[in-house]
Image (cartoon, grey):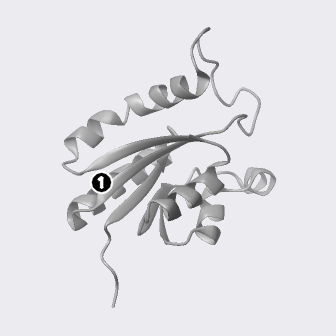
Amino acid sequence: MAEAIRTILVPVDGSDGSRRALEEALLLARTFDARLIVLEVIEEFGPLPGHYDAAPAGIDRVSWLAEERFRSLRAALDEGEVRWERMVEQGYPAQVICEIAEAEGADLIVMGHRGLSPVARFLLGSVSDKVVRNAACSVMVAR
C-alpha cells in the first residue's frame, strides 16, 4: 500500500524549470494537505564563470542571492493555500537536496529540469539526474 505524501521538498534556483516544479508542488501539497519545503541551494562557485551576479558591497552573498531568487516566488507561495517553509543552504545542489530530503523526512522531491544540451549535460552533469539516482524518496521532475 502506498504511503501518504506528508512532506514535499521543492528545490528552486530561479529557472523556468524550478518555477514549473513549484507550481506542481503547490498543487500536490494542496491535494494531499502536505507540508512544502522550498529549498534554495547556493553554490559557492557557479558551474560557469559569471553564473551568479555579485552581491552589492558589504552584503552577504548567499543571503543576497537567496532573497533575489525568492522574491519572485513569494506571491505564489502565499497564494498557494499550503503550509510552507523556506530553507537556504550552501553547497553542491544534488548532494544538499538529497541530504535535506532525508533529514526532513520528505516523501517526495519535486524539481525542475533545466534542459541542458547533451554536451553541457555531459560536461556538467544534471542535478535532477543526480537527485533521481541518489535520493532516498521518490522524485518527480517537472519539464
The answer to whether 104 appears left or right of 136 in the picture is left
Q: Residue at label 1?
A: 26
Picture coordinates of residue 90, whole percent (x, y): 61, 40
Relative vertical location of residue 110 with respect to residue 22 in this rendering, above or below: below
- Residue at 78% across, 53% down: 119
The answer to whether 22 appears left or right of 111 in the picture is left
Picture coordinates of residue 141, whole percent (x, y): 49, 62
- Residue at 47% across, 43% down: 16
Q: Nearer the viewer, residue 10 or 140?
A: 10
Q: Looking at the image, which residue sits at the far top?
A: 57
| Residue 143 appears in the rendering | no
Picture coordinates of residue 14, whole percent (x, y): 50, 37
The answer to whether 115 appears left or right of 30 in the picture is right
- Residue at 30% across, 54% down: 26
Picture coordinates of residue 111, whole percent (x, y): 48, 56
Mark 1 crowd level (few <14, some 14–19, many ≥20, 10 Å Cα)? many
